[in-house]
Image (spheres, grey):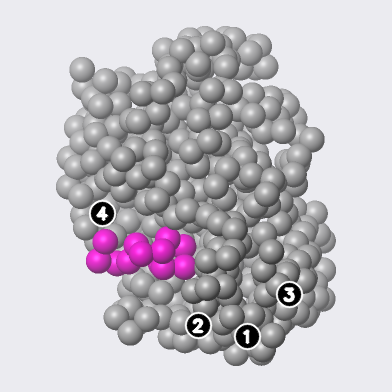
Amino acid sequence: MSEQFEKLRPHLERQMALENALILYSWDNETLAPKEAMDNTAKVIGILSAESYQALVNDEVRELLRALKEPKEFDSLSSLEQCIVKKLTKSFDRLEKIPADEYRAYSELTAKAGQIWSNAKESNDFAAFAPTLKEIVTYQKKFASYTKKPDMSLYDAMLDENEEGILTRELDVFFGKIKEEVVPLLKKVVAQNDGVDKQYNIRNYPVEKQREFCRFLAEYIGFDFNRGVMAESAHPFTTNLHNHDVRITNHFHEDNLESAMFSVIHEGGHALYEMGVDDALTLTPVGGGTSMGVHESQSRFYENVLGRSEAFWKPLFDKLKDTYPDTLADVDLTQFIRGINKAEPGPVRTEADELTYPLHIIIRYEIEKMLMEDLISVEELPRVWNEKYKEYLGVTPKNDAEGVLQDVHWSGGAFGYFPSYAIGNAVAAQIYAYMHNEVNVKECLENGNLMPIREYLREHIHSFGSTKNMNELLVAMTGEPLNAEYYTKYLTEKYTKLYLS
């Protein structure tokens, strides 16, 4: 047992407790808190954030980390303790460069920003959100200037926070390949999809019935309601305190059957990741998902690779029809599968099909780069957003609520996050390609038994928390690091079979 590590432990426990308190406030803000609570609650969040910062960034922790990184001392640690020291050192090195007063002020700002964004979206008023967003962008640039390495741009520093080692030079190549492969395929598919009738999707589906079916879906894929809860928010999300308290939200539209169903499968994928973290890791600095990209790989794997397959719906379709006996009376499984996979350019990312989805991410990636490189201003975002949508997808949002205000992410300062959705899709396709060697995925889905799939993911990804990075997990599981070829091949094979064969 390391005496130095034992001295570090109380600092870890204090910061963990404070972070859990902040997570609870964030959860409450997005779900149940009254609108007028925002200003006072933001002050509390600012105080707690400052305390969390100081629990880690202090002279005693600095000296303990210095001692623990000495070769002899480091070698005496268990493998878990070594992982914790590495992760904590990275967090310390980053936070130490950010002045405490700025960290607190930024935490208060982002605590308020979510409600300001929500109100602006509801009233279709980007100008009401723009001043807050401008402040967030200023802080993001400032923090990135403190923490970036000499060879990084400001945006690279933001990307590195979400997926270590994946910077603009890698993403430019990655997205270039996707554009090269997906855009021509999309044109072919769209030319053939006129015969796909999904008018059923915009009929009336009572919200209470949707809640009931979505709860069933969550349990069906493995979400444990003894260790998790589901609520409602303006934008669906997943958060957790530890592996026995994982929380997801959903959002319901009476005239959209698919939206809530695929949101709950998506967020359920995130939740299963956190529920699958090994008990020895939870409540430690390595007790969560390893990166945004790997996290998204799990949500997208469940939502798309599994959830939009015919095999997934074979044992479920009758229950879906029984839930809406009159509304879906004239819809059969074949029509439904073609409908939920219809490739059709639209303005909203969360409602996008698999084929158009990466183009939504490329748009955000390019806009974020422009914003962080001072090529555009916050005030120009609506115009640039609409121009990009016209260029890449041939559609123009009818208003800012459907356009630049559609995502909550920027209100929380999540710049550099959107590329992780595309990375996640690529990781999901790579996992799927190799999973077949050990699990008969189709048979499991058709039998309504997702446990072998869930256990495979838990064994190879979930249980490790963040003790391994994305490429370490992929090499151990598939024998190679991230390879976008699997993603483009997956999309080509799937949509050729659905539309072009």
Eyeballing the image, is 458 above or below 142? Answer: above
Q: Looking at the image, which is closer to me, 162 or 92? A: 92
> In what quadrant of the picture does the N terminus appear?
bottom right
Indicate the position of residue 334 as horizontal and vertical percent values: 42, 12
Q: CA distance from mark 3 to mark 1?
A: 11 Å
| Residue type marked 1 | Glu
> In what quadrant of the picture does the C terminus appear?
top left
Give the left or right position of residue 404, taking residue 212 as reference.
left
Answer with mark 2 or mark 1, whichever residue precedes in sequence: 1
Q: Looking at the image, which is closer to me, 485 or 87? A: 87
Disc 3 and disc 1 in contact, CB within 8 angstroms: no
The stretch in magenta equals 159-170
Disc 3 element: helix
Residue 391 visible to an observer of this rendering? yes
Identify the residue position indicated by label 4 in the image: 174
**Comparing labels 4 and 1, the label whose residue is closer to the camera:** 1
Answer with mark 4 or mark 3, whichever residue precedes in sequence: 3
Disc 2 element: helix
Identify the residue position indicated by label 3 in the image: 7
Residue 379 visible to an observer of this rendering? no
Disc 4 element: helix
**Comparing labels 2 and 3, the label whose residue is closer to the camera:** 3
Answer with mark 2 or mark 3, whichever residue precedes in sequence: 3
| Residue type marked 4 | Phe
Indicate the position of residue 363 as horizontal and vertical percent values: 34, 58
Q: CA distance from mark 4 to mark 3?
A: 44 Å
| Residue type marked 3 | Lys
Identify the residue position indicated by label 1 in the image: 63
Question: What mark, if any, has residue 122 been given in the picture?
Answer: none
Disc 4 and disc 3 in contact, CB within 8 angstroms: no
> Within the magenta stretch, is there residue 266?
no
> Within the magenta stretch, is there residue 167?
yes
